[in-house]
Amino acid sequence: MLKKQSAGLVLWGAILFVAWNALLLFFFWARPLPGGPSSEDPFANDPASLSRRVIRLAQEAEIELERQHVLLQQIQKHSVLWNQRQQVATAGPPAVSHPTVAPTTFVLPILVIACDRSTVRRCLDKLLHYRPSAERFPIIVSQDCGHKVTAQVIASYGNAIMHIKQPDLSSIPVPTEHRKFQGYYKIARHYRWALNQVFRTFKYQAAVVVEDDLEVAPDFFEYFQATYPLLRTDPSLWCVSAWNDNGKEQMVDAKRPDLLYRTDFFPGLGWLLLAELWDELEPKWPKAFWDDWMRQPEQRRDRACLRPEISRTMTFGRKGVSQGQFFDQHLKFIKLNQGFVFFTQLDLSYLKQEAYDRDFSARVYAAPQVQVEELKSNQKQELGEVRVQYRGRDSFRAFAKALGVMDDLKSGVPRASYRGIVSFLFRGRRVYLAPPQDWTGYDPSWS
């Protein structure tokens, strides 16, 4: 009804506009020119005089038409204002509108696992600062431990996040030899409960898991937004991680923040999984040490994760159940990407298994082989990227330690490796620490 009234007002204004200008034109033609010839003037029928009269009338008509154009604009403007006032009068205060997610747009909740670190504020502040959309990336903070100060910090964010609390805070019976590891049991219990909330209660189809001691990069959300479709469509993948275990500043290529890899090692520390994977894992979820359990061949099932050249998360949490293990020697040196890569505008098809297995392996084994001693003494720099070959567990660990690479293995898989190959920079040169080309698989006894 209001639209019809508004349209009617504009129509009547237009009619008045046309009628008024018709009358004006009639008036201009009928009246004598000021100071012009009278009907008794012998020069009244002079063609030159008549031409001047027509020109003068046209000029005056043009001026008046411009005035009427302004008048018509005012009529339209006032009709819009009148319509808005009528809406307020009949419908009350306007409702707050929220953007809607298009049917083809996916939602990736960020699940923050929290306990007793009040420094969770640092994690949440960065997530909220870089988050491009509250609707597409809802933040769910799941808190264990019942720590009041931490709970108050989380609650201070109000509706910007969702705060859920793990209800079971009881002690967990553990084997005598694991008494000092009870924290790991509680973490596994909390993960199971929190992921069940995300996938079973809230019915999300995927989630990015971070812990309360992680700081994210500016393109953290862009990275997961771009890689999610690959995870969804490539059955050889089972996660996407924001973490590079060998991502120390001197070991990554700062000129290639866009570079991504496949890895057989489960990195964690900011990782994306699908609801279908949780359906698979939840029935057999372990009582403790869930991340090492994920790295076992029974769970990995020859599937890979994606990881970046430069990490999109960094940990600032020295305090924790691991008592700062690896933090002072390693974790605090991991470089966090500070720029922004528009991953959603890049062609990431090179990460699909068939293309990657062909191209990555060809590049690695085309690189000339050198000895560790030659690398450390800066010999053969003209070769560019090179390959260091190991043949067993002991040689891998020795070479890794000499070159600054993480030398521990989980179920026989080196950190950040793919098909046994670890890629990194050493003194500015790309190095592939690789097994022989006839490599047939990981040996779980290498742990």
Image: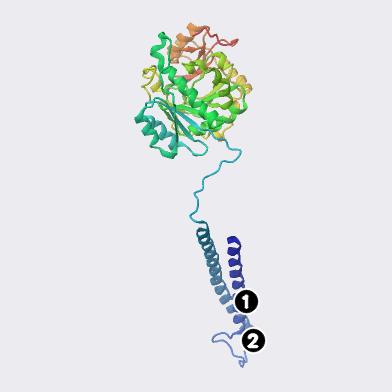
Question: Which residue type does callout 1 highlight?
Answer: Ala
Q: Nearer the viewer, mark 1 or mark 2?
A: 1
Please give left or right for residue 173 compared with residue 433 in the image. left
Please give left or right for residue 43 compared with residue 219 in the image. right
Which of the two residues, 159 or 229, is positioned nearer the viewer here? 159
Most extreme residue toward the bottom, as rendered?
Answer: 40
**First of labels 1, 2 by sequence position:** 1
Q: Which residue is mark 2?
A: 46
| Cα–Cα gap, marks 1 and 2 | 27 Å
* As drawn, 113 above or below 377: below
From where the camera sits, is residue 134 visible?
yes
Q: Which residue is mark 1?
A: 22
Which of the two residues, 410 or 347, is positioned nearer the viewer here? 410
Which of the two residues, 339 or 178, is positioned nearer the viewer here? 178
The residue that appears at 55% across and 73% down in the rendered structure is 63
Which of the two residues, 82 or 421, is positioned nearer the viewer here? 82
Badge 2: residue crowd in 10 Å (few <14, some 14–19, many ≥20): few
* As drawn, 49 above or below 151: below
Please give left or right for residue 99 compared with residue 214 in the image. right
Question: Which residue type does callout 2 highlight?
Answer: Asp
From where the camera sits, is residue 118 visible?
no
The residue that appears at 49% across and 39% down in the rendered structure is 134
Coordinates of residue 274 in the picture (x, y in percent): 56, 27
In what quadrant of the picture does the N terminus appear? bottom right
Coordinates of residue 329 in the picture (x, y in percent): 37, 17
Q: Where residue 176 is drawn, which disc sits there?
A: none
